[in-house]
Image (tube, rainbow, N blue to C red):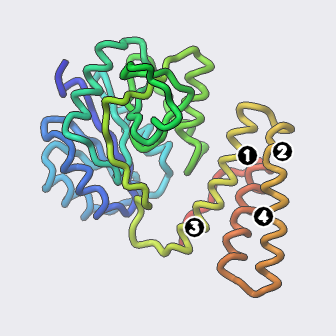
Amino acid sequence: MESKDLTIIIVTFKSEKKIVNCLKSIPSQIKVLVIENSNNVNFKKDLENQFSNSKCILMGENKGYAAANNIGLNQVKTRYALVLNPDAILDKNAVENFLISANKEKEFWLMGPASDQMKDINFNNNELVEVENLKGFAIFFNMSKFKDKFFDEKYFLYFEEIDLCESIKKANGKIYLNKSIRIIHQGASSVEDISEVELEKNRNWHWMWSTFYYHKKHKGFILALIIVFPKLLSASIKTLIFFLIFNKKKRDIYLCRLSGLFNSILGNKSWYRPS
């Protein structure tokens, strides 16, 4: 099995600095599709000039993680695809170990590195262990198990990979962690040039929207409402407290939490974008 069996997909949005180290860690013979959630022509030109194995597709606007990954995955012609965050860095043997494991466990649907999750996993001296879901920073796809539908594009941010794993498990698909694969995930934001306050508001809005939507999709409206009610109550109380003590920053963040949750409950699409 060779590297020609693999395509790597990286979704970016204002990640010009973050993605360089990621691309440097990828073997030069592997095709890379970078899906940029903007119309940044200079980013595309610079990236393709610097990394000859990379092609950058401009989305024209920020359509979110799920939609951008679907654009990339639907262009993959290889047997496997690896979805990476731009702040992930591959160990020198990561690609080889993914391909070796894929050859051993041919019926897998998804596979991920275990480094961030191994504390709670008992491998029993095996490299692979079946799990319910994966972290989204690095997901290895067996493309033969999928048709043209991957991530649910109603999500803009958060829960995309959890939702995908849930759907796969309902179809009796196999999802594995692999302890032989090492990928460094820096963990900080993959987005640059947006203020921390705006990023925090964006995170809170979408976390609450996606939380309710995920539970409604898989458990029904009433149970989803019961699950999120404590979050709704907490956000309401904290919004009032920060309003009364004139803490505008915190007030606005919790207002975003409320807005995201209410919009999801009302069935509105995930529309919030950082300014």
117 shown above or below 125: below
Secondary structure under tag 1 reads helix
Q: Which residue is mark 4?
A: 235
Front in this rendered view, residue 120 or 31? 120
Q: Are marks 1 and 2 in contact (CB under 8 Å)?
A: yes
Mark 4 or mark 3: which comes first in sequence? 3
Residue under numbered circle 2: 225
Instruction: Locate residue 93: give its quadrant.
Output: top left
Give the residue pinned by disc 3. 200
Residue underneath mark 1: 212
Judge from the rendering whether residue 67 lies leftward or rightward of residue 171; answer left or right. Answer: left
Left or right side of 230 for 198 = left
Q: Classify mark 3: residues with Cα within 10 Å, few (<14), some (14-19) or many (20+).
A: some
Give the mark nearer the N terminus: 1 vs 2.
1
User: Tag 1: Cα neighbours inside 10 Å, few (<14), some, or many (≥20)?
Assistant: many
Does residue 23 sit above or below 40 in this rendering?
above
